[in-house]
Image (tube, rainbow, N blue to C red):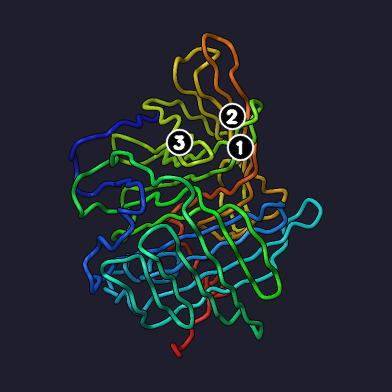
Amino acid sequence: KILLSHHPRYERHCLRILFGPEDDHRQTPFPAPPGAYEWWYFDALSSDGRYAVVAIFFLGSPMTPYYKAVVDGKKPDPMDWCGVFFTLHEKIGETWNERAYAYNLYRGGEFSAERPEADIGDSTMTFDGDETWTLSVQERGLWNQSVKAELRFSLKGAPLRLPAFGTEETEARHTWVCVAPLCRVQATIGGTTFQGQGYHDHNFGLLPYDEIETWYWVYAPLKCSDGKDRFCLLYYLPETMTPWDGVLLLLDDEGTVLTQPQETDIMLAGPRRGRYGFTYCRELEWKSGSGGTNPQFYGAARLKAFEGSFSEGPFYVRLPAHIHAAESSNGEVVWTGHGEGIGEVFRPFRLCGPIASRAMWSRIRRRNRP
């Protein structure tokens, strides 16, 4: 069972969840101390379901050998581990195929202490101070190819206005900021142009991940039987050492929170072993509200490994996902909905495994800043 209520201060080394663009600014010391990290995550799905894109800007990239250096007590400078990650996938038939890929690390970058902005390599992330993030990505690929992309993420509807979860201390070990779960996206990637719906969050903290064993994150826009569009988001930490374990949100098409259950039963099922020996569950089911056989809000998310992964390693997997959900009242179904989205599973302790470094360097390149 996950308890999704606001808890007072309880332990320094804990997690914290914040909501909305007003929280999407630097909250770690700068210059950042050894072991610090920060990343700004963006993804988008085209309106026709053909393209999926992910872009991430890093300071102190934790999903690199930087993590092991921290664990080994070497006190690495986060500025030596700035990075840009970018992928474009195209769905052909029932399978997602990689069309563009870059993950480059740089010694140095420029970051704003007041705004969610970054300049790393030849790539930039800017924010207009209101509702739009603009990404300009120009990166060398693994070999001789290059990636050039321009993306605009515009917040859809009003910003989230929800209380924080977890500690009130700014020294929380890991903070996840759900900045903009619903965005309108315009993308130009090489010769490919599309519009669609996007998502943006912001993570920061201090390594290592002492209190996190695994996290599951999944979302999808829903087409519903009553003719309305909704959006479902689940962030679940089944083994965390805190009094709460995640957040479940249901929003309408304008970004207004419809359901934020305070108590939810979560069940994991469908274990799968990935290509790097990473085992995770493909299915998450939830029930919340009145309980019994017809709870007020219930549903399931399925990570669709058979369609191909967007990213996979010995400690992490990002996959296409399907969510179906429903709401009932007095035992009667009010609406049902389903939709395609994106999900991920992350298990931090495997970052130090014997396979991890070899696997990471096979997909990451060190680059010189221009």
Of callouts 1 and 2, the N-terminal one? 1
- Which image quadrant for residue 340? top right
Q: Three-letter amino acid code at disc 2?
A: Ala
Percent position (x, y) of residue 88? 64, 65
- Label 1 to label 3: alpha-carbon separation: 13 Å
- Which image quadrant for residue 231? top right
Secondary element under disc 3, as helix, strand or loop, is strand
Up the image or down, 201 lies above or below 366; here it is: above
Percent position (x, y) of residue 81? 38, 76
Up the image or down, 120 lies above or below 171; here it is: below
Up the image or down, 370 lies above or below 61; here it is: below
Label 1 with label 2: CB-CB less than 8 Å: yes
Label 2 with label 3: CB-CB less than 8 Å: no
Q: Which residue is mark 1?
A: 222
Percent position (x, y) of residue 123? 48, 78
- In this view of the protein, which residue sits in the foreground, 167 or 269? 167
Judged left or right of residue 125, residue 271 is: right
Residue depicted at 41% across the width and 45% down the height: 158
Marking on residue 98 = none
- In this view of the protein, which residue sits in the foreground, 43 or 81? 43
Q: Which residue is mark 3?
A: 249
Of callouts 2 and 3, the N-terminal one? 3
Q: Residues within 10 Å of mark 1 (few under 14, many from 20)?
A: many
Q: Residues within 10 Å of mark 3 (few under 14, many from 20)?
A: some
- Label 2 to label 3: alpha-carbon separation: 12 Å
Secondary element under disc 1, as helix, strand or loop, is strand
- Label 1 to label 2: alpha-carbon separation: 8 Å
Indicate the quadrant containing the N terminus: top left, top right, bottom left or bottom right: top left
Q: Three-letter amino acid code at disc 3?
A: Leu
Label 1 with label 3: CB-CB less than 8 Å: no
Q: Which residue is mark 2?
A: 325
